[in-house]
Image (tube, coloured by chain):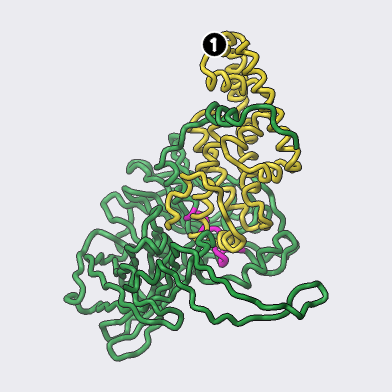
Amino acid sequence: MSNQNMGRKDAPPNLGDALIQDAQHGEPAALAAIYDAYALRIHRYFYSRVENSADAEDLAAQTFLSVIEALPRYQHRGQFTAWIFQVARSKAMDFFRRNHSTVQHDAEVMGDAFDDTLEQVIQGQDVERLRHLIRFLDDDERELLRLRFVVELSYVEIAELLGRKEDAVRKSVNRTLERLHLLMEAKHV
Amino acid sequence: MSKPNYPPEFETQVRQAMEVPEPKSETLDALREQFIARGISSLKADLQPDPAPNPFRPEKESNKMNRKPFRFSPRLAWGVALLILASLLVIAFSSPNVVTALRRLLGYVPGVGVVEQSPSLRMLAEPVTVTRESVTLTIDQAVLTNEKTVVVYSYVTPLYDSDDGFFMDGPFGSPALVLPDGTRLEIKTGRQVSTMDCSECGDIRYAMEFAPIPADVNEATLEIPSLVGIYNGLTPLDWVIDLKFAPADPSTIIPVIEYQPTATPVSATSGPTTQIPENYGATLVLDKSATLPDGYILYGNITWTDPIIPPYGLNATLAGIKDANGNDIPFEYADEEAYPKQGELRGYWAYKIPQMNFSAPLTLSFAVNAWVTLMDSPSFTFDPGRIRNWDRNGRSIRMWWLLMKLSMSSLRNRQG
């Protein structure tokens, strides 16, 4: 089995202590394994947040460069996924702080959708309607769904990343999904 | 936990609703190359600052002590390390009949490496030195070709007490060259280079590669947000240095001989740790050489075809050099200047021979370590019998010597 193109698969990474230590020493194989394990998911995360390829690619590049900078002081306790997504989330926050217009634009899009296309949302295809409804969620709820369904993090990894208990994360996701489902059902009435 | 109040397929719908387009593979590949190259140059142990204990990075010190020369990913849970072969590569610098040499317009620039020569080749007009807060940064070399721009810097810092170290988290930023018209060239890759030919250089000398600069542009501003190889907070940030370029002086460029492929198939020997007479399609090649004022520099690579050895899974290390009279010839590691592409079954090597006086031909002996991936997961059962002895924690303190032979079909089949 080759590790080639592992970044294009959704298999959860299995990065052990030795590999992380090797990466901290600049071993190319270990660095390659880390990149392959996370590149695709990092790109997905950013695209989901900024909704354009150019910025998503920029942010992914910034994230991986920061990972290199920060790796020497990372202490591996089996939470590498949470750590690397902490770096990614901080990049996203920097991005939105720097680009208020982008945030505004995002909000405007959501506002337009709410004001002008509610009827279309109701009558559209389920997935399309769901996409619009997800836009109406608050930031925290959308971030939870993003981490779970776009990045495919486990509940444990999300809990580590957000500093919450796994059970609390699971309940929050379930509550959000229940609400979305209710909204979807309501539109059918 | 109570059962979710939505049907299971609703999660699939949410996934579909949140689906995002996949990034381009070339984008992923380019970033991968940059990530690995940057990681190698920034994280190699010899790039790290002083080894004294530092309360802010306690994990680093123990890691350094335990550092192993090469190890492949533990992802290969059933990977097996094999010292599979040692090989010979014969090189005769004084006998062009032994290897077919093809002279191309390649040149070797100390501190930069091999570059393509052309009339438009330019270099740094003069070194630039900037001192801030007792840290002296020197841009000592730059080479501008039609293909790339390489800028080399080094720095000297005061000796820091280990307690001085502290970290500043981001934004980290990347070095960039800014042209007079505002065009910004971000760093593509960077690597540590030798300081041996640079008496003024500090311990760290770093070569950065950027996109080519147009032939009619002879100035640029180099921006370095943070120096490589030292923790943020120990040195000033945000260095801005104006650079001027001039046509290269041909006398400063050493001709490079590029060889036509004269591959030496790697021959297998049974090392002490393996019984596998298999060469995995490995081939060792001398790519090019240059005659330096004080010796030679050799560049080569090793490729393999057997996918049982993954990318980065095979490592050729020069074990020794003997001349025609059987005398040992000293050698030093040099910068390979190249990394395998994603998925490529290839590794690069480079060595410097720091002397000119020897009897050709030279014989180079390589040790090659391989990590193979087993396609199966060997298992076994045994009967421990009745366990009688326990320690105070209730653990068995008996030990069994199993002396079993494990069958690994993926390797056994290869023995034919």
Residue B331 in percent (x, y) is at 40, 78
The answer to whether B227 appears left or right of B81 in the picture is right
Residue A65 in percent (x, y) is at 55, 48
> Residue placed farthest to the right in the image?
B392
What quarter of the picture does the C terminus of chain A occupy? Answer: top right
In the rendered image, which residue does mark 1 sit on? A123
Residue at 27% x, 86% y is B359
- Whether the magenta-drawn stretch holds residue A102 is answered as no
Residue A103 in percent (x, y) is at 62, 24
The answer to whether B402 appears left or right of B298 in the picture is right
Q: Nearer the viewer, residue B42 or B308?
A: B308
Magenta-drawn stretch, dominant element (helix, strand or loop): helix
Question: In the rendered structure, which amino acid carries the disc numbered 1?
Answer: Gln
Find residue B28 and report its image quarter.
Answer: top left
Residue A75 in percent (x, y) is at 68, 57
Label 1 marks a residue whose chain is A
Task: Tell me, yes or no, if residue A136 can be seen here.
Answer: yes
Q: Does residue A47 lie above or below B282 as drawn?
A: above
Q: Nearer the viewer, residue B335 or B79?
A: B79
Crowding near the residue tagged with mark 1, few <14, some 14–19, many ≥20 C-alpha atoms within 10 Å: few
Q: Does residue B412 lie above or below B223 as drawn?
A: below
Q: Does residue B158 lie above or below A116 as drawn?
A: below
Task: Tell me, yes or no, if residue B128 can be seen here.
Answer: no
The answer to whether B184 appears left or right of B398 in the picture is left
Q: The magenta stretch spans which residues? A: B36-48
Tell me the SS state at disc 1: helix
Which chain is represented by green in the image?
Answer: B
What quarter of the picture does the N terminus of chain A occupy? Answer: bottom left
Residue at 33% x, 64% y is B303
Q: Colour of chain A?
A: yellow
Q: Nearer the viewer, residue B12 or B295?
A: B12
The answer to whether A123 appears left or right of A82 in the picture is left
